[in-house]
Image (cartoon, rainbow, N blue to C red):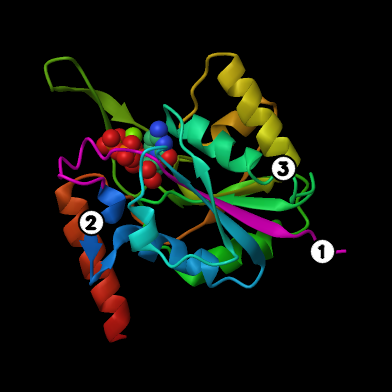
Amino acid sequence: MMARAWAVVPAAGSGRRMGAATAKQYLPLRGRPLLAHALAPLLGCKRIEAVVLVVAPDDNGWREAVAPGPRLLTAPGGPERCHSVLNGLAALADRAADDDWVLVHDAARPCLPAEDVEALFEQLEQDPVGGLLALPLADTLKQADDQGHVLGTVPREGLWRALTPQMFRYGLLRQALAAAIESGDHVTDEAAAMELAGHRPALVAGSGSNLKVTTPADLALAEAVLRAREEQ
Ligand code: CTP
Ligand code: MG
């Protein structure tokens, strides 16, 4: 039997680096909240049974940002991204089997192409563990000293940027994230938790347009990506 799939979208951050009055996931992008764009390719994927949206406990803004429905669940956020994701996984405890897939996708990534979600399923279907969308580094890398001068050039061979979604077996991921947090390692992505648990996540080549909105400049870039796609 084909494993079922679920998604968890951490959206409990405050967007400190964006410096806006509201959390960045609610900022408007082409007439819709950023969060709505981030959810669309997941809710639009027929393989995904339901999406758990993880929001700060005192946050009701999501009710206006996204349409409620039977395929949208919520869970309370935690102090850091890893805690929020673990809470999202816990909310699936009664529904998901250990071998089911779970895709974790940042609410701050509004430009995920539907084809990249398909690529994850196509390339990982037979994998016992899972993997993540990632992009080989294109720029030359510099190591800086504390004066802002170059100490040296870092070889970029074999270096990738980690994107989301990251897609892992539900049981393994929940165990790995809980263990990482328990040991005091507040990992910044799911793959790092899996690596600590001794797994070697697969790298699935993703699109460079799947950017994470962190600063106001990123917001303008995301707007341009979405506009170009609408005009295609
Ligand atoms: N996130 C979360 N719970 C937290 C912190 C972050 O669910 N305690 C989510 C954010 O909402 C975001 C994703 O994790 O969708 C990636 O985090 P980041 O880009 O760092 O967002 P923020 O933490 O909101 O931004 P900043 O670090 O600038 O405050
Ligand atoms: Mg953050």
210 displayed left or right of 199 = left
- Residue indicated by mark 2: 27
Q: Earlier in the sequence, mark 2 or mark 3?
A: 2
Foreground: 18 or 114? 18
Residue 184 coordinates in the image, percent (x, y): 53, 14
- Residue indicated by mark 1: 2
Foreground: 6 or 205? 6
Mark nearest the camera among 3 and 1 is: 3
Dot 2 beta carbon under 8 Å from ligand 1: no
The 10 Å Cα crowd at callout 2, few under 14, some 14 to 19, many 20 or more, is some
The 10 Å Cα crowd at callout 1, few under 14, some 14 to 19, many 20 or more, is few
SS at circle 3: loop
Residue 141 coordinates in the image, percent (x, y): 29, 36
Q: Earlier in the sequence, mark 2 or mark 1?
A: 1
Amino acid type, residue under disc 2 in the picture: Leu
Amino acid type, residue under disc 3 in the picture: Ala
Residue 52 coordinates in the image, percent (x, y): 55, 52
Q: Which residues are magenta?
A: 1-23
